[in-house]
C-alpha cells in the first residue's frame, strides 16, 4: 500500500468522523434552536392573549356592561375578545392558533377536543399543578405544532353570574347562546385551558435547510483541505522521498563509476530473466569480458586515465544494447552483459560488435585498448552461477588465445 493511499485513507477516515460528529452537533443545535424559537413564539402568543383579556376586562367591559340589560355584547367577554383578535392574525400567519378550550362552554366553538380534554383532566385531577404550564406537540408533518396550555380556573365570583345557573344568567345572554351550555361551573373549578398552537414545520424546515447549507460548505471545505493536503504531500513529501528513493536505489544497484548496474543487481535481474525464459522456453545468453592489460594502463597513465577507460567502455557497451538487455560492472575491469531472447549465434555477434567498438576507436590519453570476451548460452538446467562460470571460463580461454577475441563457452556437462 503506497504512502499516498495510506495517507488518504487516514485523512478520509478523520474527515468522515469529523464531518459526522460536526453534522450531528450542528443538526441537534439547529433543531434545538428551531424548537426554542417555536417555544418563544408560543409564549409571545400566550402573553398576547393574556394582555387582550386584561385590556378587555379593565378598559372595555366596564364601559359596556351598562348595555347588558338591553343587549348582550360578546365583545365584553375577555375570552371572546382574545379569541377573536388572535384569529384575525391567522390570516397573516397560518397555523398560529389561540383557543380557550372548555369542557362545557357557552360558545360551542370553544368546546375542547380530545387531546385538550386530556390536558384539562390532568389539571382537574391534580397530575399537573395549577400554577404550571403544559407544553407539548400535536399533529404531524406540515401540521405539526407546539402547544402551550394554562388552566382556566374560576377565581372571581362575578363569573358565576353568567355560568352558575340559567336562572341567574342575563336574559340577553340566553337569547344569544341559549340555556343548555356553559352552566354549572363552580368556584375554584378548572373548567378548561387557554391553549396556543405555533406551527413547527417552517422553523424546522428552515433549520434543515440551514443544516444542508452548512454541511455543503463543510464538505466543500473538507474537499479543498483534502486537495491541498494531497498537493502538499506530493510536493513536500512524496516527490522528495521518490527522488531520495531513486538516489538510494541507484546507490544500491548501480556502479558509481560506470553507471552500469552492480553485481548484486545483475544477479537479481538474471534470476528474473531465467525464470521468464524457462516459462517461455526461450533463449538467454551472457557475455563476460574484461579490458586487456588494464593494470598496465593504470600503471602507465594513472588511475584517473584507467577510470576514464572504464567509463568510456561502459558508454560504448550501452550504445550497442537493446532496451531489454542489461550490462553490469562485475568487478574491477570485468564486465558482463545479459542478452534476453538471444541464442548463441546472436550473442557471439553482439560480443564481436562490442569488441570491435572497444578496439577500433582509441581512448583519450590512452590510445587503443582491447578486451577479451566469453559467451555462454543458458541450457535451462544450470543455475545462474554455473552459467556465469562457463562464460568466465570462455573469457580466460580468449585471453589464452592472444586476447582481443570472442570465445564461445563449452556446453554444460
Image (spheres, grey):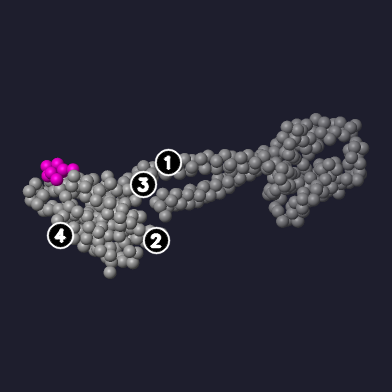
Which residue carries the number 4 mark? Answer: 400
Distance in Å between CA atoms under marks 3 and 1: 14 Å
Distance in Å between CA atoms under marks 1 and 4: 67 Å
The crowding category of the residue bearing disc 2, from other C-alpha atoms within 10 Å (few below 14, some 14 to 19, many at least 20), is few
- The rendered magenta stretch, by its main secondary structure, is classed as loop
Q: Is residue 43 visible?
A: no
Provide the residue span drawn in magenta.
361-368
Q: Is residue 233 magenta?
A: no
Q: N-terminal of the two: label 2 or label 3? A: 3
The crowding category of the residue bearing disc 1, from other C-alpha atoms within 10 Å (few below 14, some 14 to 19, many at least 20), is few
Relative side of 275 to 311, left or right: right
Which residue carries the number 2 mark? Answer: 281
**Residue lying farthest to the left in this orientation:** 300
- Tags 1 and 2 in contact by the CB under 8 Å rule? no
Mark 4 element type? helix
Q: N-terminal of the two: label 1 or label 4? A: 1
Which of the two discs, 3 and 4, sits closer to the camera?
4
Which mark, by number, is residue 228?
1
Mark 3 element type? helix
Q: Nearer the viewer, residue 166 or 406?
A: 406
- Tags 3 and 1 in contact by the CB under 8 Å rule? no
Which residue carries the number 3 mark? Answer: 238
Q: Position of residue 9 (x, y in %)?
A: 46, 52
Which of the two discs, 4 and 2, sits closer to the camera?
4
Distance in Å between CA atoms under marks 3 and 4: 53 Å
At x 90% / y 37%, what residue is drawn?
A: 176
Distance in Å between CA atoms under marks 2 and 3: 41 Å
At x 22% / y 57%, what residue is drawn?
A: 407
Amino acid at each position: 500500500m503506497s504512502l499516498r493511499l495510506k495517507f488518504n485513507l487516514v485523512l478520509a477516515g478523520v474527515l468522515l468522523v469529523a464531518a459526522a460528529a460536526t453534522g450531528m452537533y450542528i443538526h441537534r443545535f439547529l433543531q434545538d434552536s428551531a424548537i426554542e424559537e417555536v417555544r418563544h413564539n408560543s409564549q409571545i402568543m400566550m402573553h398576547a392573549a393574556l394582555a387582550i383579556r386584561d385590556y378587555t376586562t379593565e378598559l372595555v367591559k366596564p364601559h359596556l356592561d351598562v348595555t347588558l340589560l338591553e343587549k348582550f355584547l360578546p365583545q365584553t367577554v375577555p375570552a371572546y375578545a382574545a379569541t377573536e383578535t388572535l384569529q384575525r392574525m391567522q390570516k397573516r400567519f397560518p397555523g398560529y392558533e389561540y383557543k380557550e378550550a372548555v369542557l362545557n362552554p357557552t360558545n360551542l366553538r370553544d368546546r375542547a377536543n380530545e387531546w385538550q380534554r386530556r390536558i384539562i383532566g390532568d389539571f382537574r385531577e391534580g397530575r399537573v399543578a395549577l400554577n404550571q404550564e403544559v407544553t407539548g406537540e400535536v399533529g404531524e408533518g406540515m401540521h405539526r405544532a407546539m402547544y402551550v396550555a394554562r388552566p382556566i380556573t374560576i377565581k372571581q365570583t362575578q363569573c358565576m353570574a353568567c355560568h352558575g345557573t340559567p336562572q341567574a344568567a342575563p336574559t340577553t345572554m340566553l337569547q344569544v347562546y341559549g340555556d343548555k351550555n356553559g352552566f354549572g361551573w363552580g368556584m375554584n373549578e378548572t373548567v378548561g385551558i387557554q391553549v396556543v398552537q405555533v406551527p413547527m414545520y417552517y422553523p424546522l424546515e428552515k433549520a434543515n435547510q440551514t443544516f444542508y447549507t452548512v454541511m455543503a460548505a463543510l464538505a466543500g471545505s473538507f474537499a479543498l483541505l483534502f486537495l491541498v493536503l494531497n498537493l502538499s504531500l506530493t510536493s513536500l513529501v512524496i516527490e522528495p522521498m521518490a527522488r531520495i528513493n531513486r538516489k538510494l536505489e541507484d546507490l544500491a544497484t548501480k556502479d558509481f563509476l560506470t553507471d552500469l548496474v552492480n553485481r548484486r543487481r545483475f544477479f537479481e535481474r538474471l534470476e528474473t530473466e531465467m525464470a521468464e525464459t524457462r516459462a517461455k522456453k526461450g533463449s538467454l545468453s551472457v557475455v563476460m569480458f574484461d579490458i586487456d592489460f588494464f593494470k598496465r594502463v593504470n600503471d602507465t597513465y594513472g588511475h584517473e586515465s584507467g577510470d576514464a577507460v572504464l567509463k568510456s567502455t561502459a558508454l560504448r557497451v550501452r550504445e550497442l544494447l537493446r532496451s531489454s538487455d542489461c550490462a553490469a560492472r562485475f568487478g574491477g575491469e570485468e564486465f558482463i552483459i545479459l542478452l534476453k531472447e538471444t541464442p548463441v549465434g546472436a550473442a557471439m555477434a553482439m560480443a564481436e560488435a562490442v569488441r570491435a567498438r572497444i578496439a577500433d576507436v582509441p581512448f583519450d590519453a590512452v590510445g587503443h585498448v582491447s578486451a577479451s570476451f566469453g559467451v555462454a548460452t543458458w541450457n535451462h538446467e544450470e543455475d545462474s552461477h554455473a552459467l556465469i562460470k562457463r562464460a568466465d571460463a570462455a573469457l580466460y580461454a580468449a585471453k589464452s588465445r592472444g586476447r582481443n577475441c570472442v570465445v564461445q563457452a563449452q556446453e554444460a556437462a
